[in-house]
Image: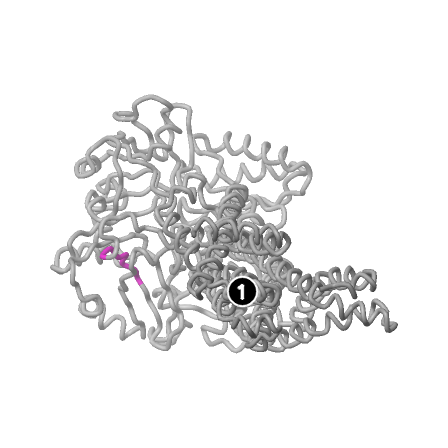
Amino acid sequence: MFKNYLKSAYRNLLKTRLFSFINIMGLAVGMAAGLLILHYVIFEKSFDNFHQASDRVYRLRYERIGVDGSGAVRFASCCPPAGKLIRERYSQVENLGRMLKYAAAVSYQDRRFIENRMFFAEPELFEVLQFEFRSGDPAEGISQPNKAFMSESTARKYFGDEDPLGKVFSVDQKTDYEVSGVFRDLPANSHLKADILLAWENLITLYGPEFQDAWGHTGVYTYLRLKPGTDIPAFEAQLAELVEAEFGEALKHYNLVMNLPLQPLRDIHLSSHFMQEYELNGELDTVNFLLIIAAFIIIMAWVNYVNLSTARTLTRAREVGLRKVAGATRGQLMGQFFLETLLINLAALILALGLIALALPLFHALTGIPPSHTIWAQGWFGPAILILLAAGILLSGLYPVMVMSSFQPVAVLKGKLGGAGSGINLRKALVVFQFVIAVILLSGTFTVYRQLAFMQQHDLGFDMDQTLVIKAPRVRDELYGEKFTTFKKTLLVHSAVKNISHATDVPGRQIWWDAGAIHKEGEDASKGKNYQIVGIDADYIDLFDLKLVAGRNFLPDAPADKEALILNETAVRWMGFDSPEDAAGGRVDYWGNIFTITGVLQDYHQQSLKAEFEPHLYRYLPTGRDVRGVFAVKLSGQDIPASVALIKSRYDEFFPGNPFDYFFLDDYYDQQYHSDRLFGQVFTLFAGLAIFITALGIFGLAAFSATQRTKEIGIRKVLGADISRIVLLLSRDVLILLALSCIIALPLLWLGLNGWLEGFATRMALRSELFIVPMLIVAGVTLLTVGYQTVKAARGNPVEALKYE
């Protein structure tokens, strides 16, 4: 019996090659797209799951907010005493470990690099986070001063194939460390990227014993694993009591609220965008939206199958009637039709796996998933294939099978088909669904790219073209200031260099220096708010072409400017001045020290256009505040490689022992939009696939409709109808459905696109072409698809058409 079913199913697929191809191709593209998106989504949501008991691991953060909600400062890190006190006082804590990021120059023999993923770490950290050690004892390896752990790749970078254990390297040419252990590189799906871990005791030596009690230092990352069953809200309430006990009166005096929130470890990668993050994190909304797109694409592929299968019920009705007359039961007929569905879905799955294999390298390059994290090795992949296959057979095959197996043999053989109207209505509803999704995805693609273009073309308020940014030397002596001045003069004699500035930060980077309780002179300290601070020299404003709207720039030969400030417009408003002119010459209480405001800068976008303008204060610090500073070099644009080589040679001459670590500011600034660009690229790719699947389905329906109406077309041609009138007649129903789809899509688009754009502080206005152009494109694709089939049918010989059936 099964063999007969199989033969019959195979013959039927060969008999209707076009429709079989359309079904298989549509399902294959849908499956491949869905599985690839699922691969990306699962990778993004798998971050930090590899840690033991990761559901009980949290990161302790620090927040400081004005009681009126203003001046919010939210850090990914925390203060040194917080972890120390929590470890001592709270029994809910199973383990707690701390680390502090320390970017520095590392050297071994003639190899020198700036290590941006280096940390001081407590040995207890390895009881909270999972590190896989190849050698060394995690409990003892860095419990002693001047000991360090290295990742495998970092050890190879410095020591090649030699055994790294016992090797001694230098940090900033000041402190030597011995490698006491090597750990495997942390997985790609870890929010923490660490290459070197230094003994915590050296941090205490570096900053002094008072560091342990420094509540003003917010650079310590604190991880804790809580005991099973811990009530998180109750524990956070206890932390609030700790803050109240330590700072209650001071916080009331300054009208501030301080929090120590717990952040689930597994939420960090997709839901954490605070100050002092290790690096830019992903976007949960983007990942979830792509998951929805994957679901829609797969559903659209199934819709195609249902549409074509139900459309073909008429041609298979006589077959069903004859089989029933011959004694076939409804169950046997359902089995045969389900077998056909199974064969089509199996063929589609095999083709989908081939498409995935072809697309995988490009997809990995597009999404940033490392090739080592291949889809074929994922534990979820096998079950996902089986579920997709089973769901495809059931959801796409059930309705057509039920319809075809329900035909009454006598009625069928008489040419009477019950329920045909309901089948037509279902097809129309499914076509409308496909059109709505296609229009939404295409309009979304247009909007994403237009917003990205808007951000790239928007006036940022500063000039970052041809700007080379060099990390300031970490190895320096008491003559550092004089060396920088000479270094600057030496370079400025070359036409390749237009200007040089020394600063604690540059536009495009998150400002790491902030201070609270700053207010106008004479006001109560409770009026103080939190401000971001940048230390600059007298060339900073000119180099970045910042606009002074009141007052003047700092003067290099004016001693009084050492106690002066420049504010931006937002800071002027925050301090309560009436205007920039009112602020210029005003005086500010900066932690008990009085500073004079010499000028006011026009607001500019320090970071992404997603962020609101923040209040900035600029202090005159011509050689920076500490080793975290930078040199900004404005180039003339002539032979950039030669200019960089020239600057490097002078840098090595004046600051020996320091790696020349640099970046171009425009590239660095553009990295802030990486997740948005990725979203746009992936969105475009799968929107295109959705339109392809829709066009494939419409092509199949048009071909079937043209076949079914062959005799009608012949009669109309005999009666004198021209080709254009016949094409319009056959296209009319599809165009009506498309118009209905556009009406349904419009309000959905308006709500969805406005919601997405609300994530940008500076955003474009929604314009009519963002809706009209996608609709016209979908209409054009539809007309071409339908038109090809109808023109082909309309140009046929009417005599042959009248012979049809």
- At 22% from the left and 71% from the top, the residue drawn is 248
Residue 6 position (above or below residue 791):
above
Q: Residues within 10 Å of mark 1 (few under 14, many from 20)?
A: many
Principal secondary structure, stretch drawn in magenta: strand
- At 44% from the left and 59% from the top, the residue drawn is 335
Q: Is residue 60 magenta?
A: yes
The magenta segment is 56-62
Residue 165 position (above or below residue 598):
above
Name, please, the residue furthest toward the top. 162
Please indicate whether residue 2 sits to the left or right of residue 9 in the image.
left
Residue 797 position (above or below residue 426):
above
Q: Position of residue 529 (x, y in %)?
A: 39, 70
User: As shown in the figure, which amino acid type bears the numbered disc 1?
Assistant: Val
Q: Which residue is mark 1?
A: 320
Taking depth in this image into account, of 699 and 666 the one nearest to the observer is: 699
Task: Count up the numbered dots.
Answer: 1
- At 34% from the left and 44% from the top, the residue drawn is 102
Q: Position of residue 730 (x, y in %)?
A: 74, 70
Taking depth in this image into account, of 667 and 334 the one nearest to the observer is: 334
Name, please, the residue furthest toward the right. 720
- Say which element carries label 1: helix
Q: Which of the 4 image quadrants contains residue 658?
A: top left
Q: Is residue 31 magenta?
A: no
